Image: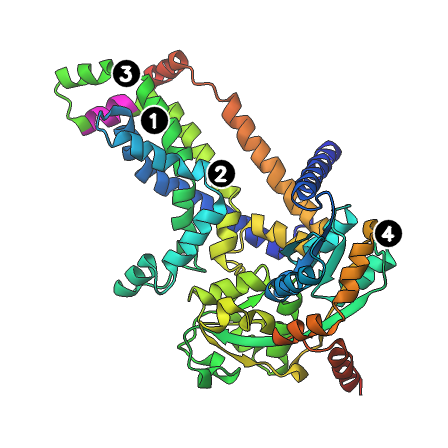
Amino acid sequence: MGLSDGDIQALWLSLQLASTVTLLLLLIGTPIAWWLARSCSRWTLPLAAVVALPLVLPPSVLGFYALLAMGPNGPLGQLTVTLGLAPLAFSFAGLVLASVFYSLPFMVQPLQNAFESIGERPLEIAATLRASPLDAFFSVVVPLTWPGFITASILTFAHTLGEFGVVLMIGGNIPGVTRVASVQIYDHVEALEYADAHRLALVMLLFCFSVLLAVYAFKPEPNRLGGEHDGD
Amino acid sequence: MLKTGLLGLRVLRLLLATMAISLVSDGAGAEGISIAAASDLKFALDEIITAFKQTHPKDEVTVSYGSSGKFFTQVQQGAPYDLFFSADKELTTELAAKGFAGSAVIGYGCGRLALWSASLKPADLTLDFLTNNAITHIAIANPAHAPYGKRAKEALQASGKWQSLEAKLVYGESISETAQFVQTGNAQVGIIALALALSPALSSKGSYWLIPKSLHSPLEQALIVTKRAEKKPLAHRFASYIGTAPARALLSRYGFEEPSACTSTKAQKAN
């Protein structure tokens, strides 16, 4: 393809960011989605709205607050100082943190739908078999909803790859640290290097298209799933 | 491969069309002009427009601020701007050469670089102090495409500090984003446009040190009336207003030197 070292570094960084965020969100998003799907608390609606915020909020709003919060006078900035950690702005950790929030709905919403779709019955049966809630979750819910986990993970991964505005506002564009592929493309365009922009943009386009194609081609078939498990 | 290329092109064209439409709707109304201006002009040009409107109360002037490189592309794609104020004179010269100008290239000022900080003591605002361990992040505009970034890099190179400081650098996409990084304290210090350091938003919040212009090539700034506004009298009237005493005074208050100051440093460099 003739990608430069800088382009490859940026792509690699994007992949690292997307994988880290996906893994973290699997850990954070699963309990949130479970709670949203199961709880009757009056706090579920406000929480669901907060989770969905990044879908509608301009990245500039999120980036602006992140930049202020991570500064030496912001709450996150003071927290990192108190804990003796490095400041979050212009760091990979800062990008991960912002992206976790930014991609939260892409993990939580598909999982919540999956959890809601199985209904109460399987859990009631598990309870009569004296399965603890945690045991029931891993041996009943996860096998029943794993297509939801795959969809949620792929969407989260792809959405983080496509992140741009927030990264631009808090990243500081440091090669190998915060200069992800989307920012690298923007820089090529800004520098009027259209041929370079085209090459990297095409790679992103093809990659994201394949990812989405995979999501749409992936139709959960409970029967076949059951069959596979029988074979195990 | 070819098909995807075409698709990319089509998406791009659609994108540019949408951009143009949205610009038409906020930009040129029934009567008036719309200006594209480099972000370093934000405060100076706002005041110039206010002054202009006092003597021309019926004229409508709207302005969009952004990076000169982006406007350079947009003007070529038919964006509905009547005037383009570029932080880099070369971009206006190139537009004129390509037939996108409706006037001569008119120099309006010579920009200066300032080392600005919200937290450092004024005495510590020197290029030498940047190597100090207390400073972990230095913000400059992206030298790959921002005129002020290019000059900041030149200044650091000329003072022999580029290599030792490179690991501390963070890059703003425009000179105003660079200033944001410093204003929010995420970077302790930054190299920004003097025009921004002198702005109401920043001047009360920190201090600056003027970087000697002998350290970098001049920041020659220029404007053109675009081809589409060639026959708009208001566009030409506004362009000539920039050369009048009230406008010159405002530009100079925001640190823009006379255009001749740029050419004289150039002459010195050549010698």
B48 is higher (above) or lower (below) than A52: below
> Is disc 3 surrounded by few (<14), some (14 to 19) or many (20+) residues within 10 Å?
few
Q: Where does the image place residue B16, in percent across and percent down from the top left?
A: 70, 41
Mark 1 falls within which chain? A
> Does the rendering let one see residue A16?
no
| Kind of residue indicated by mark 2 | His
Write down the residue under mark 4: B231
| Kind of residue indicated by mark 4 | Lys
| Mark sitting earlier along the chain (3/2) | 3
Mark 3 falls within which chain? A
> Does the rendering let one see residue A153?
yes
State whether discs 4 and 1 lie on one chain. Answer: no
| Kind of residue indicated by mark 3 | Gly
| Kind of residue indicated by mark 1 | Gln
Residues in magenta, as a range: A134-141
**Residue A119 bears which disc, if any?**
3
Q: Where does the image place residue B3, in percent across and percent down from the top left?
A: 73, 31
In front of the other: B170 or B57:
B57
**Residue A112 bears which disc, if any?**
1
